[in-house]
Amino acid sequence: MVSGAHGLDSRASGVRLDQQTDSRASGGRLEQRVEEAWRIAAAVVDPEVPVLTIEDLGVLRDVRIDGETTVVTLTPTYSGCPAIDQMRDDVLLALTAEGIRDVRVDFTLSPAWTTDWMSDAGKAKLEQYGIAPPTHRSGERQGPIPLSLGVRCPRCGSLRTREVSRFGSTACKSHFECLACLEPFDHFKVH
Amino acid sequence: MNAQLNDAELEAAGQPPVPAAQPPADAPRTPARDAASIAALHDAEAADVHGDVSVDELHLTAELTGADGSAVASPDVAEYALRLGDDALILSQRLGWWISRAPELEEDMALGNIALDLLGHARSLLHYAGTASGRTEDDLAYWRDEHEFRCAWLFQQPNGDFAHTIARGLIAAIWMQELYTALSQSSDASLAAIAAKSVKEVAYHRDHAVQWTLRLAGGTEESRRRLLVALTDTWPYTDELFRDDALHDRLGDVAPRPSTLRAGFDEVWAAVLAEADITEADFTNPRIGQSSGGGRHGHHSTHLGTLLAEMQVLARRHPGATW
């Protein structure tokens, strides 16, 4: 936890720090502080898929003010995902750099993360980046007969693709190859 | 967990267990990045340069918690979480050995990914177990001795050849899926949250094991022979997973009784064997009964001691080591 970023260079935190003090002095416009903190935290990107923000991913779950403390709640994508530690550090740094002094990042496992929370903007950014986005909602794949929809190659757009391995370069992706343009690519698994 | 690789693996690998996708230096930035975000980035860098932000505790591992981060487990719930946490931790440690040694690159990544998921489950469960006694997940992983571990014998079994790893993984994943499905209805909110998270990942593990079971069974004569040997060697460790004891009596609706998971397990198991064209007579030996494994009470097979020695040596030789 970063608490009390005292000595933060005034040039670095400047105006925002003053605003913060003002709003507290005027009795605390709580909603505005929450919105501000959300905006800053929401701009933090996934270290492994840097086109996606943690908001796009659905990893940013909650921002609230608890007394003097700004509490940000994140949820990991997969249980073992090592990127969550980096995301936590980045959220702490982004908020303290904006002059928010007392910050805590909590984690929650419930409700369990799902790719259904990924924003449409996020999916578009993924495809542009060369990663095929989740193809459908996660609930649709339950049942005895797994439904697998065609995954479109993010490079040439062909649906003639093949899953090479369900386990890709990170926990959240599987490894595909395109039978049309012959390029390999990552697919963000429906989860 | 700070020390998850053993010495030999560190030397051999010299890199994290799962290759992380490093963004290229010229990776396109998000177009949504506005001036304030860029300023935040610069500020963060400036703060770093000046060393003004206290980041000491950022090196600590995140402690993933269930529904409520402040939940404290009762001694019985802690004992239960310890059992499941140890199962996941020990199987994860076993699978980690395959990294850089699997038959093909894709399999290297698959087994590494499964190990990573299991390590995530272990962290959540051991963290929660530790709340009852004021210990951290690392305390529990690295500073308990063999008789204090509560994992079942199945998870301690050596990797053997690839077929043994698959047979062990198949039994483990079918059981875990039944278990976590039931446990997600637990009256204990933290266990329910961990189970609901884990069951989605275990589904991939089960699929992986099933696919390989079918491939080995229907592959060459040699692959089928090896799979049957592996099933013969591994099957005796199945019963232990379904044994009720006094702890389950006390837990009530906090946890499903292990015996109640058997029917669901048997159904899936039978379906996989039928698809693989294998009958129980093909791999069960009437002279080999089910193991009397007492892992839940700290009585372990000869394999656990050496596994722990390797897993714990770094943390014990260099207390507090981080990287």
Image (cartoon, coloured by chain):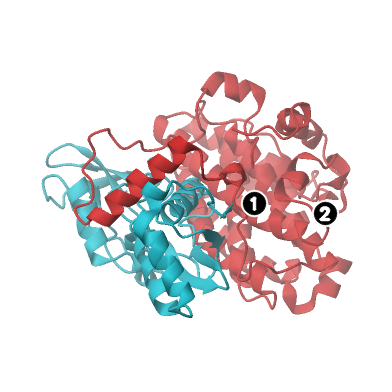
Badge 1 local density, few (<14 within 10 Å), some, or many (20+)? many
Query: Which color has been applied to chain A in this rendered view?
Result: cyan
Instruction: State the image coordinates of residue A49 (x, y, percent, origin top left).
Output: 33, 47
Q: Is residue B183 visible to us here? A: no
User: Vertically, is B212 above or below A149?
Assistant: above
Q: Nearer the viewer, residue B54 or B145?
A: B54
Place residue B177 in its image quadrant.
bottom right
At 50% from the left and 67% from the top, the residue drawn is A112
Q: CA distance from mark 2 to mark 1?
A: 19 Å
Chain in red (letter): B
Instruction: State the image coordinates of residue B47 (x, y, percent, origin top left).
Output: 44, 43
User: Vertically, is B88 above or below B216?
Assistant: below
Specify the quadrant that holds the C terminus of chain B. top right
Place residue A104 in its image quadrant.
bottom right
At 87% from the left and 48% from the top, the residue drawn is B298
Same chain for the residues under marks 2 and 1 in the image: yes
Instruction: State the image coordinates of residue B58 (x, y, percent, origin top left).
Output: 57, 45
Specify the quadrant that holds the N terminus of chain B. top right
User: Vertically, is A138 above or below A162?
Assistant: below
Q: Which residue is mark 2?
A: B296
Residue type for callout 2: Arg
Q: Secondary structure at mark 2?
A: helix
Q: Nearer the viewer, residue A35 or B201?
A: A35
Q: Nearer the viewer, mark 2 or mark 1?
A: 1
Q: Which residue is mark 1?
A: B123
Q: Chain of mark 2?
A: B
Place residue B19 in its image quadrant.
top left
Q: Nearer the viewer, residue A101 or A157?
A: A101
Instruction: State the image coordinates of residue A158 (x, y, percent, origin top left).
Output: 12, 50
Q: Chain of mark 1?
A: B
